Amino acid sequence: MAVIRDVMPSFDLLQPNSADEARNILAQRGSDAWVLAGGLDSFDWLKDRIKRPKVVVDLSGVDELRGIRVKSDGVEIGAMTTLTEVAQNPVIRENYGVLADAASMVASPQIRNQGTIGGNLSQDTRCWYYRAGWPCYRAGGNICYADTPEGRNREHAILGADRCVAVNPSDTAPAFIVLDAKFVIRSRKDERVIDAEDYFIGPDVDITRLHVLQPGELFTAVRIPFTWASSRFYFEKIRDRNVWDFPLLNVASAMFVSNGRIDRVRIAVNAAAARPLRLKSVERAVRGMPPDAATGEMAGKRAVQGAVPLQFNAYKIPLMRNLVKRAIGGVEEAKWA
Amino acid sequence: MLLNLTINGEQRSDNVDPRMLLVHYIRDIANLTGTHVGCETSICGACTVLINGSAVKSCTILAVQADGTKITTIEGMAEGDRLHPLQEGFWEEHGLQCGYCTPGMIMTAADLLARNSNPTEAEIREALEGNLCRCTGYQHIVKAIQFAAAKMRTSKAA
Ligand SMILES: Cc1cc2nc3c(=O)[nH]c(=O)nc-3n(C[C@H](O)[C@H](O)[C@H](O)COP(=O)(O)OP(=O)(O)OC[C@H]3O[C@@H](n4cnc5c(N)ncnc54)[C@H](O)[C@@H]3O)c2cc1C
Ligand code: FES
Ligand code: FES
């Protein structure tokens, strides 16, 4: 008996063996091509027929894009390195615990075995109106369905919304931002190195994408300097269930404390806006202060200044305030009367 | 496209459409229907198989991406009539009711036990986070894996 099944529409599959070959294919095929890394985001789009690329460029055979290498000035992680490899790598765990924590809290074990760092940082938003193929602003239309009176927007943005209220769902993004990581992007013409913070963009810059990667470009590696290695790290992710669920909010921070005062600090949150947010005004405000509950309280309040809730996500404001408070001031013991 | 791989020790060579998912290849071309499809969206874990020993969701990878690899499915666990300790564990500890999730649970557990021969209950639960069971409840499944781990340790020691 013939098997009749609804399958993905057909595409040309190209499987380069080197980064140069991949880059040449991408440069030639431009917006006709879809880069396939771990597929956890990609296959949803293809199976649902919402994105129908002519060409799929599978990077799984490009070995030079995999692996974690220790260099003189830091650590380089190939874009195709899996989340499991990052979470379990001894050098990452020892120096950049905030990243190991973030990677180990993504989705589920199998997904971490398949999902890659480049893909985790380049994944699209999970706003279900957009992912279901509704013609919203992000998809080229002229409405944001999540921001209508009936819109379901519990997971959506409290900061930086500009027509679109979708959020960036990556758990590793804020960790890379606090580590001051650099992303290496190759195009036909050149190779550019971008600060993690500048890789991500909001709808005010481009409403159709969450990052600056252009069609035809290849994300090859992440470089993490030793600047923040072994500092005092904090990572916390809030989600509905312990597994599968994307963050409702997450926070990452790195700080150096000397003589009981915060000397240097970086802090970032994600799932609050369309891009992970580095909280520079909080960083400035807490420098020179003791890392205690009072400083945390002040930091939390400052972090949510300007936040605007939608109908169903007002809880994110106190949640973000508290996460920032804990990241700066530490977690308090519960007190029982 | 030509696909060469080894499934449960058997070498195969097939011509497949590039868009074919690995799980459909395993079920429809290799005729190994023990691997199930639950959600097809990387959530339920029913389709879990081992690729070179690592547990992955076969609904979220193209068959041709597994070219040159070694795949293990639930059919590759028993040796003839002798059940694998994990299968025995699910039998002895009532680790299944309808059985839909079982192949995926067993393959995920096989990955865990290969890395950690004496996992704590918390480690077992964490390893199973990517697998959904809708009827047995997880308690018996955890016990089944503890049974298998103990049995595999003693048979190794013997
Ligand atoms: C059920 C489920 C739950 C999840 N939960 C979480 C979670 O809690 N937290 C979290 O952070 N993530 C979560 N994810 C996302 C997942 O972890 C993946 O990391 C992510 O979707 C994409 O990584 P990937 O390697 O699978 O890339 P793909 O899906 O293949 O690619 C993602 C995007 O990036 C582009 N891309 C990838 N690599 C490159 C490259 N080298 N150069 C250029 N472009 C590239 C692709 O073209 C595509 O647009 C979840 C996914 C699923 C399916
Ligand atoms: S069928 Fe693959 S995870 Fe559900
Ligand atoms: S035994 Fe029925 S779903 Fe697990």
Image (cartoon, rainbow, N blue to C red):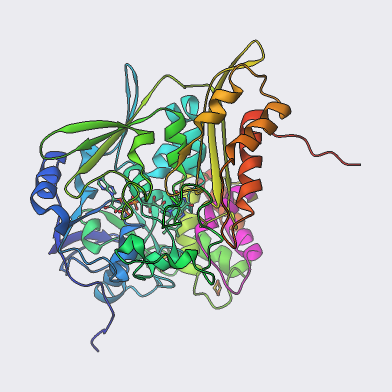
Image vertical order of residue A4 relative to residue A37, above or below: below
In the rendered image, residue B127 lying in the magenta stretch gets the answer yes
Q: Is residue B43 left or right of residue A237?
A: left
In the rendered image, residue B101 lying in the magenta stretch gets the answer no
Image vertical order of residue A322 relative to residue A228, above or below: below
Point out the image quarter for the N terminus of chain A. bottom left
Report the front residue among A13 and B119: A13
Q: Is residue A19 left or right of residue A162?
A: left
Residue A94 placement (x, y as % from top left)? 49, 25
Ligand 3 in which quarter: bottom right
Residue B135 placement (x, y as % from top left)? 60, 74
Q: Which residues are magenta?
A: B122-145
Residue at 64%, 54% in the rendered image:
A315
Report the front residue among A296 and A252: A296
Residue A314 placement (x, y as % from top left)? 62, 55
Report the front residue among B99 and B76: B99
Report the front residue among A186 and A107: A186
**Residue at the bottom extreme?**
A1
Is residue A62 visible in the rendered image? The answer is yes
Residue A272 placement (x, y as % from top left)? 51, 48
Residue at 57%, 66% in the rendered image:
B90
Point out the image quarter for the C terminus of chain A. top right
**Residue at the right extreme?**
A337
Is residue B53 visible in the rendered image? The answer is no
Q: What secondary structure is the magenta-colored segment mainly?
A: helix
